Amino acid sequence: MPRIQPPDLNAIERAPASPAALTNVLWQVLSNSVASKAKVDSYNLETGEYRVVLQGTLDLESETFEKS
């Protein structure tokens, strides 16, 4: 799996709207992170709409060693 670079994080916003496509992009980010956490920011019981905030730290050290 290719390493995610910080500029690649914009791919989250460019991902197609399908849940499968977003899952793939988020999996790449999470699997290249050394720490991550999620927070449910809001949830609407009437509509089912939700907002989740994802925060983490990319594993930049591994990228350095792979380029050597």
Image (cartoon, rainbow, N blue to C red):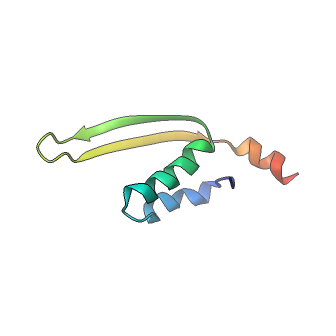
In the image, taking residue 38 as reference, residue 34 lies left or right, namely right
Farthest residue to the right: give it: 68
- 35 is higher (above) or lower (below) than 62: above
* Quadrant of the image occupied by residue 52: top left
* Quadrant of the image occupied by residue 54: top left
Q: Residue at x 59, y 40 (%)?
A: 57
Farthest residue to the front: give it: 20
- Between residues 52 and 48, which one lies in front from this camera angle? 48
* Number of numbered discs on residues: 0
**Residue 20, position in %: x, y?**
43, 56
* Quadrant of the image occupied by residue 17: bottom left
Q: Residue at x 51, y 61 (%)?
A: 11
Q: Residue at x 61, y 54 (%)?
A: 6
**Residue 67, position in %: x, y?**
83, 54
**Residue 10, position in %: x, y?**
51, 60
- Between residues 50 and 57, which one lies in front from this camera angle? 50
- Between residues 61 and 3, which one lies in front from this camera angle? 3
- 8 is higher (above) or lower (below) than 50: below
In the image, taking residue 25 as reference, residue 64 lies left or right, namely right
**Residue 38, position in %: x, y?**
42, 36
Farthest residue to the left: give it: 46
